[in-house]
Each structure stands twice: as C-alpha cells, then as structure tokens.
Image (cartoon, rainbow, N blue to C red):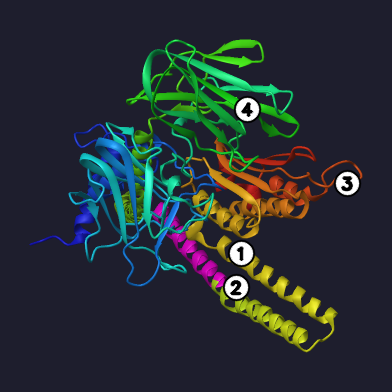
Amino acid sequence: MTASPHARHLCHFVVSALACLWPNQAFAMKPAQIANPIGRIARIFDSQLVKTEDRVSWLDTRVSTLSEHREHAMKVGLGYRGCRPKVGAPDPSVTLDLGSEHSIDTIFLVPVQREFLEDPGIFPKRFTLELSSREDFAQRTIIFTTAPNTPSLRSGDGNPVPFPARGTARYVKLTVHEGYNKGMLDLFGLSEIVVTSNHDPVSFGASVTCVGDLNAPGIWYPEALTDGRTPLGIWQNGEKTTHGLGDSVAVSSSDETVSWTIALNQTAPLDRLVIFPYQLDRSFESSVFPESLTVHLQGADGKDEQLACEWTNPLPGASSMTPLVIPLGGKSAKSIRLTGTHPYLMGDMKIHALSEIEVWSHGKNLARGLPATRTRGTDKSPVTSLTDGFTSEKEIMPVSAWLEQLAERGKIERELTLLRPVNRELASESELNATWGSAVVLGLTFLIPVFIVERRRLMSREQLDNLRKRIASDLHDDIGSNLGSISLIARTARKDLVRLHGPEEVADDLGEVESIARESSLAMRDIVWLLERRQDSIGDLVQRMRDTAGRLLREIHYTLECESNKTAAKLSLDAKRHLFLFYKEAIHNVLKHSQADRVSIRLWDVDDQLALEILDNGIGLPLNEKSIPAPIQKLEDRARVLDGLLHIASSKEKGTTIRLLVKRSHLTSHPSLA
C-alpha cells in the first residue's frame, strides 16, 4: 500500500525531531547555514528547495564578480536610429566597412540609453546579422536571423547583446525586419556596434552606410555607431582600487596648454588612441576632460612630427563618463604627444585632467607601464599614473571582456528575477510544513504550549493581514474614487468658467482644488503601499523610492543608487512608514527650497546600519533667526522615532546634504516603533 503525502511528511518530521534531540547519532547532520532551526529541518527533506537556493547563491556570487551595469545620460552622439520610410520600402539596414578583412570573433549590439527604468527601448525586434568580404554581399555568412514565429529578441535592460561569429570578413551588415511603430514604421536604434577580432575591437572608426536612416545632427547619426561611446560608461571592472587617480593640472588662463608625451619602445603602426576622463564625485557622475585637444605623432628620427587629430567638445561645459576613442588608421610613430589646448572650467578653476592614456597597435597597448612626460610651459615632469591601467576609480578592462561581462550580468539578473520568487515560495511552503510537523512530534511530549502559542501568532498575523488588505482596498476604491471625481469635476468646471469667461478667482480656486485632489490621491496611494505586507523589504522600499523620485523629480536630473547587499531584509510596518516619509519629506525640501538641478540619492550599508543620503547642488535650506535650517523639524522627528543618527549640512555654495543612519535592528522591530 502507498503511503499518503501526510504520512510521508510525518515520517520526515519524526526523523528530523530525533536528529535534533540526538545530534551525535548516526543520522546527525552537518550544521546548516540557515539560522532558523525550522528552516534547517525543512531544507533537509526538500531537495528542490536546496537546489534552488544553491543556484541563487551561486548566481549572486557570480554576479558580484562582474562589471557593474550603470547607465549614464548622454546628451550628444546618442547613437543611430533607422526606420522604414513608407510601406513597401526595403528593410532598413546598417553596413560597417572595417577597412580590411579580419577574422571576426564576436559582434556586440549595444542598445541606446533608456529614458526611464522600465523603458523597453528601441532595440530591433526581428533582424538579420551577416558578414561578407564583398561589398555587395553576393557571398555572405549569416551570423544570426530571427526565426519566424519565435519571440522577438529584446534588450530592455540596456545590456549589450553578443553574437559569436566565425569567419573572415570586411563588411558587417544588420538588416532590420521589424522594429517599433512610434510615429514611423519599424523604428529601431542602437548606441554602438562593436566588432572584435582576436578579442580586439576592429570597428572603431569604421565607415557606416545606411538604408532608411533617421538622422538628427549631433545626436543621432551613423558615425555614432563606431565612435566607442555608449551609455554604459567606462570600460572598468566592479571593484574599487587605491591606484593613482590620473593627472590633473590647474592652469591660470583659458589659453594655457598642457601636453603629455609618451615615448614608445618601438616604431609601430598605431590603430587607435583611447583617452579616459578624470572622474570626480561618483554621486553626480561627473568628470573632467579638456574642452579641446590635439594629438601629434612623431617618427623614429624625433623630428618628423605630424598632426593626427584635433578634437573639440561638441557640447562645451558638459562632462562625459565615456572614453574618447581616436582612430589612427595604422599611422606609424615612435612617440605620441597629447595636448590639452583649452581647459575644462569648474567654477573659477581651469583644469586639464585625464585618468588614463592607451595607445593600441595590433591588439596590444604599447603605452601600458611607460612613463608619460607632462609639459607645462618650460616645466617637464614624469607621470606614471596615466599608463598604469586604472581609471580614477577602477581597473580598465579590454572592451570585449567588459561587454561580455555586462551581457552575462544581464542574463544572470534575468534568471535571478525568475528564481527568487520561486525560492521564497518554496522556502515558505517547506518551513510551514516543517513548523507543523515539528509541532506535532514535539508537542506529544513537551512542546504542546509552544505549538498553541505559534498557532495563535499565525492566526493573529493572518487576521492583521486581512485587516490591512481591507483598509487598503477601502482607501483605494472609495477614497481614491472620490478624489478622482473631485479632480475631474474641478477640471471640468474650470474649463467651463474659462470658456464662459467667468471670474478668474473662481477658476483659480477650482485649479487649486484639482491640484489638492491630485496630490491627496497620490498621498493615498503611498498610504495603501505602506499597508501592503507583501512589499515590506528594503528592496521594495527602494523601488517605491524610485517611483516617487520619478514622479517628484521629473524636471530635475537625479540618480538613485542602492549599494546595500541586504535588500531582502524585512522592515517593520512603522519603520517602513517613517523611513519612507523621511525620504519623501527630504525630496519635498529639495523641491521647495533648494532650486537645485541635480540630486543624488544613495542607500548603502555601514557596519550594522543602513545609510540613506540625499544630496543636491542647490542654494541650501532657509535659516531661521537662530541660523538653523528651518524646514528640518519633521526630519528630526522621523529620525528620533527611528533612533537614527541625522546629519544635515547646508550652504549656498555646496547645496544640502541630508544623511540618516539607522541600526538594522531598529528597522525590523523596535519598542519605540510599536
């Protein structure tokens, strides 16, 4: 006779209870990594849960070793857009001429920057990628083509998409069969197409021909596909370093130049020069780079110097978080001189600054480890931090390895997004079964009171959850509907007054009623979210903070970064409420008082504390008669309830910094939050 599932569960729990009572016997187990004893028992007998947790743990470890995915807003040279001009027109296409034949390894398609977090972008839906040694593609090798009746290949997360290639070719062609219908037919766009040979990029500076382009001068144009600039930033790994930041020189006038000369160990044909910006405060993602520069190459005799390139910032005053790639087309030289002809202006300061210089020839950086000579007027000084292989923050990676790591990170993060809910559900179900089974076995002897208390706790929690759901539903359905009706009626009445030329004072009052109703509706949504138990983790709070920032700071450039590795930790109801309202009050202060145009928001771990910081570059907070920032009373009250440490620094020159540190134990359960 086959045993029932309940009987099998009971047998498992009996064995587990015996294992707990006699740990030194033959059936004793190794100590589990799960702190909860019930969780340890559940994982012994649920192989699927163990397998899922091991997979999640391995993926978390793996993703921590990969380069960070950080998108940086670009204002010029965004990439290339194409479309189908009219129904029946040929498929839009892009063809790269690499200049000569190469043995192709990989082709990376890099999406254009996203306008907001959930933006799906305009990465082509259905397309064909092919190689050829002939310009007319009479003989070709198809690298990839979207099969009929298959899901579209999308890259809505902004990560590059790699396509392994095997073959020798001079031309690379992308033909788009289906794009997006956003005001034009089959619209698509890319930031960069990177083609590698022997893991070295050979597409930088390649000529581009297009069918069905949608150009915007200085913003969208074919050459942007091969300029080495992407919204993914600088080619660096994920770990910080303590190496030199680079080289920066303050000059006294806008005409004063600074040059850096690198004497190579050999005369060699040079493929490209790569110059990395000098990175400043990462909170504002800013950098320093000369406003204009020149590049000179010098032959073996030391006299035959020729101008190889002149570059000027296409958007004066704007900083860039991407390296500058200058193709040199195989020109032969033994030394290279880079001259900043116009400095970067930072307030009253005039600065020439770089973080790294690379000189590439046949897949090798000839400048690596060689000293550079900095010349300012008659002063010459050796500089080693410009060729050490590090930017101002991290170690520089080969662009192909960097793109591969970003692509792998995207795949892992998509898998984790699917696995984590499954893992939580399996863990919850297994622990619930283990709780019941252990209570039955041990309750027969001496744990019946514990079983009763646990059962009552679960029932009370369920009743509390039901009450919270009813309150949230009533707020959303009744009050939300009423506020929406008030807003609609006020808007309609105001339009009627304007149309009938009624009193302007009444129209203004109705406009204010509409605004108050709309703001009240948004506040009600925040209250409903605060009551939602399924969104009680720090990660859920961060997502709500992103949504709030996107709504309130839509006219201000802002960044929000969460560097905490404990985002799965649960918050108590009151801690969640006070922390979110503290954040919202700080954002309102920025809007009301700061006149800022840049805001940086960060969350990170400081030992056993969670840190929240809001910085702006505004004019500071208004002061009262005691020279104390006036609008901070509510912030101090929230910090006091959370038993947190609040620091506020405000000045007209440096803007405002608000930093709150709260112990994690106070965020999960704390007497003052009851």
Horizontal side of residue 310 vs 239, given as left or right: right
Residue at 69% of width from left, 45% of height from top?
Answer: 639
Q: Which residue is mark 2?
A: 475
Q: Which residue is mark 1?
A: 527
Spatial CA distance of label 1 from label 4 is: 56 Å
Judged by depth in the image, the label closer to the viewer, 4 or 3, is 4
Query: Which amino acid is tagged 2?
Result: Leu
**Magenta-drawn stretch contains 445:** no
Q: Label 4: how many residues lie within 10 Å, few (<14), some (14-19) or many (20+)?
A: many
Instruction: Return the x and y of residue 383 as percentages of the image width and height.
Output: 55, 14
Instruction: Return the x and y of residue 340 as percentages of the image width and height.
Output: 60, 26
From this viewpoint, which residue is outermost toward the front?
304
Query: Which amino acid is tagged 4?
Result: Thr
Q: Quadrant of residue 23?
A: top left
Spatial CA distance of label 3 from label 2 is: 38 Å
Region in magenta: 446-472
Q: Which residue is mark 3?
A: 624
Q: Secondary structure at mark 1?
A: helix
Spatial CA distance of label 4 from label 3 is: 47 Å
Contact between labelled residues 1 and 2, with CB atoms less than 8 Å apart: yes
Instruction: Return the x and y of residue 552 as percentages of the image width and height.
Output: 65, 58
Disc 1 or 4, which lies upstream in sequence?
4
Q: Main secondary structure of the magenta part?
A: helix
Q: Secondary structure at mark 4?
A: strand
Judged by depth in the image, the label closer to the viewer, 1 or 4, is 4
Disc 2 or 1, which lies upstream in sequence?
2
Horizontal side of residue 546 vs 206, given as left or right: right
